């Protein structure tokens, strides 16, 4: 049955609606007929539009696609006022172009790769088609070093934006870095919650060697560690290195590696945090700071604050 001009005009206006809604608008058309008419031509999407009449993708629309990896093509189509077919095609193009820029960079051991791995395990999130990294905005040295490695060595462009998150002590300002690719999930063998992340480092076992360990620990320390003054045994001037690492196997592995190097890590478990601290006093803290490959100067300076 030939499509009338009135039907085509209505379809131009409502082609982004759900198929059950379109079925009510076009009672004489099957779902298959509607879908075919909308998607039968990449050139004009079945709506009689000429090439120069098609709506071009704006930079703002492309940002929406890149920064919402958790949304489906249908959800993005509703958000942007485009067809699901258009959005799906554009997403494939974005992911494909990102993969073509991929240079690897994580196949050869290096200090920067070791640091990147530690940072990723502390503050990174790997999704099926993307990777994100969220840290306090004030820690620019930390996030800049992470971003440089991803862009210059691995070969992906990272998008960034500012986040404001409500905390108990007030509002926190964070910097979110994000890039689109399935390469991270494929390389690490996981996406979603990391859980005990030490198992994903089996492919990078060289990080535990002395040559690279302090760079890996530096990335982990900049994300999950701190240097503070504690009240221990009546002393109000007792420096401690503290790591907040909740997963059991991951925490124990880092503690074992420090123990091998002559440090004395002690576990702690509180309602708000789980981790360990170094219990060897000032000399141990000084030796730790001299060895660690940290990017954050504020984490290498003692703060006179009792915890």
Image (cartoon, rainbow, N blue to C red):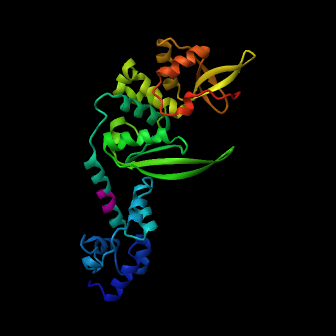
Q: Main secondary structure of the magenta part?
A: helix
Q: Verify whether residue 91 appears in magenta.
A: yes
In the rendered structure, does residue 101 fall within the stretch colored magenta?
A: no
Towards the viewer: 152 or 57: 152
What residue range appears in magenta? Answer: 89-93
Left or right: residue 255 versus residue 9 is: right
Q: Residue at x 52, y 22 (%)?
A: 289
Please indicate whether residue 9 sits to the left or right of residue 137 in the image: left
**Residue 245: in sight, yes or no?**
no
Which quadrant does the N terminus fall into? bottom left
Where residue 298 sits in the image (x, y, percent)? 56, 33
Question: Which x, y percent locates residue 152?
Answer: 32, 42
- Does 182 sit left or right of 67 as displayed? left
Q: Quadrant of residue 301?
A: top right
Q: Please name whichever residue, 178 or 273, is drawn nearer the observer in this view of the structure.
A: 178
Determine the residue located farthest toward the bottom in the rendered image. 5
In this rendering, the answer to whether 132 lies above or below 223 is below
Say whether residue 177 is visible.
yes
User: Which image quadrant is residue 42 in?
Assistant: bottom left
> Residue 208 placed where, x, y %?
40, 21
User: Residue visible at 38% across and 83% down?
Assistant: 10
- Name which residue lies at 28% across and 30% down: 108
The C terminus - image quarter: top right
Q: Nearer the viewer, residue 259 or 23?
A: 259
Vertically, is 163 above or below 254?
Answer: below
- Figure check: 140 above or below 36: above
């Amino acid at each position: 049955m030939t499509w009338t001009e009135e039907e085509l005009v209505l379809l131009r206006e409502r082609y982004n609606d759900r198929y059950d809604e379109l079925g009510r608008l076009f009672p004489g058309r099957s779902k298959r007929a509607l879908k075919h008419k909308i998607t039968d031509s990449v050139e004009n999407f079945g709506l009689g539009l000429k090439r120069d009449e098609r709506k071009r993708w704006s930079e703002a629309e492309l940002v929406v696609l890149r920064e919402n990896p958790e949304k489906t093509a249908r959800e993005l189509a509703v958000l942007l006022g485009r067809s699901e077919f258009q959005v799906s095609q554009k997403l494939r193009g974005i992911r494909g172009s990102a993969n073509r820029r991929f240079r690897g960079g994580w196949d050869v051991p290096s200090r920067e790769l070791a640091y990147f791995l530690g940072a990723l395990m502390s503050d990174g999130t790997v999704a099926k088609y993307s990777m994100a990294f969220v840290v306090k905005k004030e820690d620019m040295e930390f996030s800049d070093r992470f971003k440089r490695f991803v862009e210059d060595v691995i070969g992906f462009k990272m998008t960034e934006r500012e986040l404001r998150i409500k905390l108990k002590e007030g509002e926190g300002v964070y910097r979110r870095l994000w890039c689109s690719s399935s390469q991270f999930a494929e390389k690490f063998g996981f996406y979603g919650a990391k859980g005990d992340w030490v198992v994903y480092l089996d492919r990078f076992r060289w990080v535990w060697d002395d040559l690279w360990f302090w760079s890996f620990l530096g990335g982990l320390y900049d994300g999950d560690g701190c240097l503070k003054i504690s009240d221990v045994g009546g002393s109000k001037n007792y420096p401690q290195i503290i790591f907040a690492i909740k997963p059991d196997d991951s925490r124990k592995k880092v503690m074992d590696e420090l123990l091998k190097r002559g440090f004395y890590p002690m576990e702690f478990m509180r309602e708000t945090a789980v981790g360990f601290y170094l219990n060897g006093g000032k000399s141990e803290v000084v030796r730790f700071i001299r060895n660690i490959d940290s990017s954050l100067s504020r984490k290498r300076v003692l703060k006179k604050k009792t915890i």
